Structure formats: C-alpha cells, structure tokens
C-alpha cells in the first residue's frame, strides 16, 4: 500500500502521515525531508540558491525515486507537489491519494508562527498578506487537489477518520 497525502502547507500532512504509517506499519516519508537529505541543504537554501524551478524538478525526481524504492509507504508531499511535472499522475497511478482540505483561516492560524521558515511564505509581512497568499495559492492548486480519490476535511480529519476512508475505498474499489 502506498498512501500519498496532498494539500496546502499547514494542512497536517506530515503529522497525520506519521500516525498513519505507524498504524499501517509501513515506512513514513516526507518528500521535502527526502529532498533536503539528497541535496544536503534546506528547502529555503535550495529556493534561495537555485530557485523554485530547480526545486520543482528535484521534487519530481525524488518523488519518482521514492515510488521506485518503496512498494509500501505513507508519503507526505509538499503542498505544490501535485501541480508540477505530472507528479499528480504519478501519485494517482502508483498509490492512493488523499487530499487534506483545511480552511484558509485554519491554515493561517497554523502557519503564522512558522511562515518565515517557508520559502514561498517568508516575505509576507503579516497575517492578512499570509491569508491573501494562501487563498491565491489554493485557488491555483484546487484543480489538482480535487482529483484525489479521497478527501478529508478539517476539523474531522483524524487518524480514525482517515483509516475509515481508506478501508471504505478499498472495499468498493
């Protein structure tokens, strides 16, 4: 089983992913952490030194590498992963994809304290700018997120709720 978690930054992909991997007794990987490991530098450093285009290509390469190496995994993707380099098709063809839908107001609450450490949010001066950027980003990404066969909407997206969604999906597939 490969379970891929997609959604906006701050949606809880990594936190929920770790719990799901433990529950399913499979490895957990965070795609950004895999990129950092391979590049030997932070995502912020990659963006600053080589730009978003380079990062998105590395993201696509590392995603394909993870898929090739792990027949069973729970993978937390980056927020933009499904939107570039046909990554969504890779996710849909090689595992089960779950979209974690979290309202923008909740994303702002979760991200406000850590926005400075996120390359695409770091330059934003305040909560209003953060909210505006998140709304714009979500509007651009929604078409990709909506293609996931499973969606779990906050605040009801607990470990148990996701396990039930996954079980129901496999029973009807």
Image: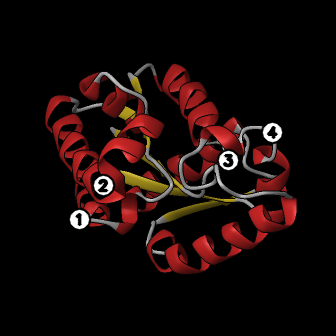
Bin the neighbour count of mark 3 within 10 Å (Cα to Cα): few under 14, some 14-19, many 20 and up. many
- Asked if labels 2 and 1 touch by Cβ distance under 8 angstroms, the answer is yes
- Asked if labels 1 and 3 touch by Cβ distance under 8 angstroms, the answer is no
Res 158 → quadrant: top right
Q: Which mark is residue 113?
A: 4
Residue wearing tag 1: 85
Residue in the picture at 62% in, 37% down: 117
Bin the neighbour count of mark 1 within 10 Å (Cα to Cα): few under 14, some 14-19, many 20 and up. some
**Real-space CA distance between mark 3 and mark 2, rounded to the nearest whole angstrom:** 19 Å
State the image coordinates of residue 29 (x, y, percent, origin top left): 40, 28
Q: Earlier in the sequence, mark 1 or mark 4?
A: 1
**Real-space CA distance between mark 1 and mark 2, rounded to the nearest whole angstrom:** 8 Å
159 up-or-down from 88: above or below = above
**Mark 2 secondary-structure assignment:** helix
State the image coordinates of residue 28 (x, y, percent, origin top left): 43, 25
**Real-space CA distance between mark 1 and mark 4, rounded to the nearest whole angstrom:** 31 Å
Which of 168 and 150 lies nearest the eye of the viewer?
A: 150
Residue in the picture at 50% in, 69% down: 145
Q: Nearer the viewer, mark 1 or mark 2?
A: 2
Q: Single out the residue that lies furthest toward the front.
A: 49
Q: Earlier in the sequence, mark 1 or mark 2?
A: 2
Residue wearing tag 2: 56
Which of 20 and 134 lies nearest the eye of the viewer?
A: 134
Q: Quadrant of the N terminus?
A: top left
Q: Relative to 160, is 91 on the left or the right? A: left
Res 168 → quadrant: bottom right
Q: Which mark is residue 10?
A: 3
């Amino acid at each position: 089983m490969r379970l891929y978690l997609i959604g906006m930054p701050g949606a809880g992909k990594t936190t929920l992913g770790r719990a799901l991997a433990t529950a399913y007794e499979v490895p957990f990987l965070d795609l950004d952490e895999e990129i950092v490991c391979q590049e030997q530098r932070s995502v912020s450093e990659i963006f600053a030194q080589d730009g978003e285009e380079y990062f998105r290509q590395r993201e696509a390469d590392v995603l394909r590498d993870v898929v090739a190496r792990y027949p069973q995994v729970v993978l937390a993707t980056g927020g933009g992963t499904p939107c570039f380099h046909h990554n969504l098709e890779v996710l849909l063809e090689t595992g089960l994809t779950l979209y974690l839908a979290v309202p923008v107001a909740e994303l702002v609450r979760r991200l406000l304290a850590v926005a400075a450490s996120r390359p695409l949010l770091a330059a934003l001066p305040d909560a209003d700018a953060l909210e505006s950027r998140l709304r714009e980003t979500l509007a651009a990404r929604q078409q990709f997120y909506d293609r996931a066969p499973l969606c779990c909407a906050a605040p009801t997206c607990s470990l148990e709720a996701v396990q039930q969604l996954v079980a129901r999906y496999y029973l009807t597939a």
